[in-house]
Amino acid sequence: MASSLHNTSFLCSDFHVRNLLGVSVDENEHILITCKGVVKLYNVLDRRQVRSWSTKSWHPFTSGAVTVPTTNNLAVVINGNSISQWSREEDDIDNVKRYNFEAPIHQLLVSADKVYTVFTNGEIEELQSAISTRRESKQGFLQEDETITYVQIIESTNTALIATKKREASCTKLYELQLNQSGGRSPRGYDLAVANCTLTGLCALSSSILITLWSNGDMYSFDLRNDSLEKLPGKKHATETSVIPSKITKILELSPSHIALVGMGKGDEGGLIVLRDLSFAMTVCSRKLKMYHDPPLAWVTPDGIVVAEGGSLALIPYTVKESNLATVFGTKASEDYEYTSEVCRSWNLGTEEAVPEEAQETIYTNKSTELTHIIRELRKDTLTESLLVTHLVNILLEQKKTRLLNETLDAFRDIPEACLVDIANYYLSCSDADFEGLCKCPPMETKCVIPGDEPEEVTCPFGKAKAHFVNGLLRKPFTDILLSPELYRLGFDCALSLIQYLHFILAAGEAELVPEEASRVPSVAQASSWLSLLLDTKYQHLVMTSQVDIHRLLLSCFTQVNNLRIFLEGLMDVEPLVKRVVEAKVLPPQMNSSSYSLERLTIT
């Protein structure tokens, strides 16, 4: 698979963007989200908050919380001049001892297995060492009117890079200092400037390469190991044309060969994430964001890029792979020459040379002959999958190629939300007979009984074949903020039948919590998201109708979703008990509400 940015997924929204201070990596697929008044431990995999710690409004957090690798405790800066550390079992961190400092603190940084305290005067010291000497004056080397705009620790050289800016000056100064060295003279600051340009983004890579972006779009590369800082900003690397370079842009390192630029997109005021290949100085792909924040709010985690998307946090997973000439040009050559092969023909003598496996996949790979022919007829020389799919779906809808639409949903990963709605309109307007015999469908229950005081029988509104095709549509990933406006184009009758089907698969248990990869059944989360967006976009029509059947459907939907919520809350209440059983722990006295005790007996 080539390098790419994958579909955006929602994380959380219970905070104000202006209060967001940072996101840092915790352990076991967890992250720490720090706002001015609260630190949240969030499970990325389950998309849920595990727990949180809050502080009084007059003692706000002033930098992102971090995990101390040696103790697994959490540490954060409070009021800009004190540090608090606490264990995960702590409930009230206002009762935890705080370490006050004479010098103001800029932030905490984690590097390898150490946490460093970065003071506003430029001094950088290990956390425990700083705590033990907190009463001592930190001299530093920055002037009072110098403000830190960027700081990064490079583990391979055990050095820190600090960029500063004075209040009245337009030029940025760069300092490089060796960590864990006592005494010695203060580091010298070097001007980081390009004629008639403003620095709008910079990033120090783990490979000791400094990447800078300037307001004219030029990107420069500087080797910190081999070049003197007097030669800053280095040599011109590329020209960025996707984001507006005059706006503040955040540069994130994804791998030694790939970076991501988070800035303002051209053509509107929305944000844009651009994936760039450093080896070939080219843009690989991009993702639009709902809003642009100044400065951009984005962080790299093992699960993907966490970015502020409007008033919420979103996760954008990514895949990066070191490129070669074959991966860069393989797909393009296949489109231009309408030729697919497992070998690369050289320019002379017609000889054949083997190419890497990843270069053998093109837009024609794993497609039927009929669908491949239609793709070739499009003659669209774009490398962006979503743009190609848009043209392809329009052609298939015009020709009413139902089977090929189903194949397109299976074969392509990036399906624009507008195309999903177009396909939904087509599927839902077709009769059950139009889908019969088009493919082999798995067995499926068509009726279920919802238990209760008055048991209710629910029947699937679609035949098995049509339900199979609709499931393929519902399984595709989407972004709710992009799908919601498109759903207004979905006819009310079509929307009503889809609501009925979503209600059925939730009530019948057809929707699974975590469907298997080969399964076409949507997950509970996907079905619930579709149902929520449909009820939201068709709300006025639904509440104004006089049809009793629709009112009963809405009431049944509410009852079913409420039952699911109660069930899941019950599971969460049982979680501590089950965890103790698995770990073979005896229940504490306060949890023994009866004369019984729960033990685990191991029979050998």
Image (cartoon, rainbow, N blue to C red):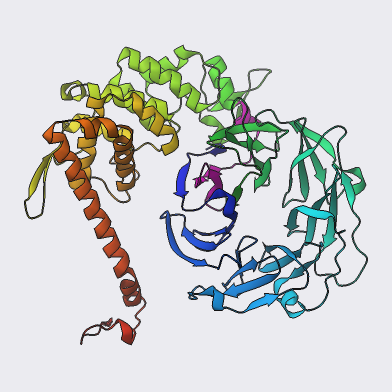
Seen as rendered, the residue at the extreme left is 454
Q: Which residues are magenta?
A: 301-329
Compared with 466, 180 (above or below) is: below
How far from the left and from the top, in percent, is residue 585? Answer: 35, 82
Query: Is residue 510 or residue 21 the one in the foreground?
Result: 21
Front-most of 275 and 21? 21
- Pick the front one: 20 or 374: 20
Left or right of 337 on screen, residue 190: right
Total number of numbered discs in the rendering: 0
Whether residue 244 can be seen here: yes
For residue 135, above or below residue 38: below
Residue 242 picture quarter: top right
Residue pictured at 65% horizontal, 34% vertical: 324
Residue sitting at x 77%, y 69%: 125
Note whether 42 is above or below 319 in the view shown.
below
Residue drawn at point x = 32 percent, y = 84 percent = 590
* Image quarter in which the C terminus is found: bottom left
- Give the residue at x 72% y 77%: 131
- Relative image position of residue 542 (x, y in whole percent): 23, 33
| Front-most of residues 23 and 113 | 23
Q: Is residue 163 magenta?
A: no
Q: As drawn, is 562 to the left or to the right of 284?
A: left
Q: Quadrant of residue 71?
A: bottom right
Res. 263 image quadrant: top right
Q: Is residue 224 left or right of residue 536?
A: right
Q: Find residue 299 and report its horizontal and vertical position in percent.
A: 60, 50
Residue 153 in picture, x, y percent from top left? 74, 58
Residue 326 within the magenta-colored segment of the rendering? yes
In the rendered image, is residue 440 in sight? no
Single out the residue that lies furthest toward the front. Answer: 58
